[in-house]
Image (cartoon, rainbow, N blue to C red):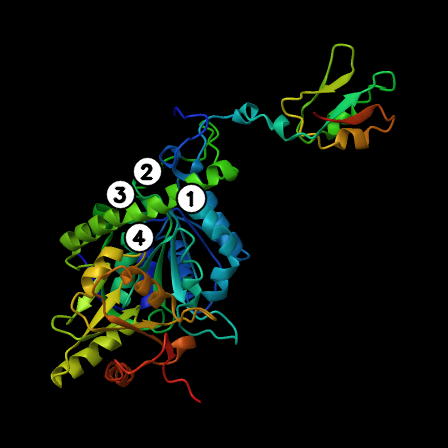
Amino acid sequence: MAQKKWPETWQEVTPGCMIFEGGNSREYHTGSWRAQRPVWDNAKCIKCGICYIFCPEACVKEDAQGYFAADLDYCKGCGICAHECWPGAITMVEEG
Amino acid sequence: MSKRIGMEIALATAEAVALCRPDVIAAYPITPNTHIPEHLSDIVAEGRLDAEFICVESEHSAMSACAGASGTGARAFTATSSQGLLYMYEVLGIVSSMRLPVVMAIGNRAISGPINIWNDHSDIMTMRDLGWLSLFAANGQEAVDMIIQAFKIAEDPAVQLPINVNLDGFQLTHMVEALFLPDEKEVDRFLPRRKPYAALHPDHPVTMGALGMPDIFTEATKARDQALVDSKKVILKVWKEWEKQFGRRYEPIEAYKTKGADVVMMTMGSMGETAEIAVDELRREGVPVGLLKLKLWRPFPFEEMKKAVRGVKTLIVTDRCCSLGGPGGPLAAEVRSALYAEAERPAIENVLIGLGGRDVTVNDFKQMFRQAGKSRGIYEFYGVRG
């Protein structure tokens, strides 16, 4: 069923607010919620991947060299990765 | 052919549910609705109905199971009363917002406390704003008829909303009444199989119950409200079809001897039957009184309400429920609201009666009629001692 990405008017709201297309959370950029952003210091990083495992948004990605970075389209800046990183390679930096 | 039988109304209600061939029944027993799911479990055990009967551990689970079943496209039914309804409360608004046409019978009972298992309407009144359609039966025949109508109304493609059928605990649930029970063929002719708007299936993924943030919640709420308002058309259509096929007429507000009446009483549920006798007796004495029986509580029939009181001097609205610390009874509050903008409207008096199962007799109704016009304040606890 064809569905608008986001209803503008109440008439466009589907019965029960049902969503008929899968995977559309990708279109919602939660990165706009962020007040702080995680920055990796690869000199300290031991490539353990604990940031990747703990990220509740699943937005931490591994690059070709095995280092990690957050996809800022979705990173909400919660700081869990920085909290969990025991070598202390991640710092939360103020946005703006 | 319909068969005229004498049967306890709760059992007849269960027979009516079985005639609608529900796929899933999930219920937890609580007085006074218990005989409805109990009898349905017998019907399923006897092999007369091919349905999944889920013995859940609570009413919260009963309504959750109905929500899940209805989401897959199944026809789901449950029944409850009082505290049981409160225990499923959290799920009630979810079911209506997800547009799942679950049908629920409520054997109306007072909400504790003090602990009380007897009839009044305080249970259903707590959920009046949750987006369910709501019908009120005045007798066993209406309970049976409304159950069958309820499935058709709820599942109509233009409605897709849950609905509750209210029958007074004990006064109706436990009463043996002579009534017509339709047969399977007749019900099959009246009630088509459900065609869900969408159903949960791995091959066709659909999200039900997604998060609605501030930028969509107002639109979603307006859409829900409009769905209820629009459902009245379907309710009236289904009632016309019912009358055509079964010969029994249903209206949002049924008027009884209101022609030329100065004073009119308004009731919901089984009290209407007693009030009719009081009207008959007073009319014989030459007192021009009449009665309005509200059968459709949600959506509230505003237009019918305005028409019903034209020319009436005093309207006595009875409420089997007290909005504690509020404007008296919920029905009176809504009637006042419905008529507020009218240039000509009756004086509206509100009596709270029949609370927690207290009997309301023919003489009580006659007394209430006779007291019309004497100031009662905004509302009055009729017959309260002290």
Asked if badges 4 and 2 are on one and the same chain, I answer yes
**Cβ–Cβ under 8 Å for marks 4 and 3:** no
Quarter holding the C terminus of chain B is bottom left
Q: Name the residue under label 1.
A: B221
First reached walking from the N terminus: tag 4 or tag 3 = 4
Q: Mark 2 points at which residue?
A: B195
Discs 4/1, front: 1
Chain bearing tag 3 is B
Q: How crowded is mark 3: few (under 14 residues within 10 Å), some or many (20 or more)?
A: few
Asked if badges 4 and 3 are on one and the same chain, I answer yes
Q: Which of B201 and B308 is in front in this view?
A: B308
Per the image, label 2 sits on a secondary structure element best described as loop
Q: Nearer the viewer, residue B286 or B284?
A: B286
Q: Name the residue under label 3.
A: B192
**Cβ–Cβ under 8 Å for marks 4 and 1:** no
Per the image, label 1 sits on a secondary structure element best described as helix
Toward which corner of the image does residue B174 lie, by quadrant?
bottom left
From mark 4 to mark 1, how far is it between C-alphas?
A: 23 Å
Discs 4/3, front: 4
Say left or right for B374 vs B53: left
Q: Residue at x 36, y 49 (%)?
A: B22
Q: Name the residue type under label 2.
A: Lys
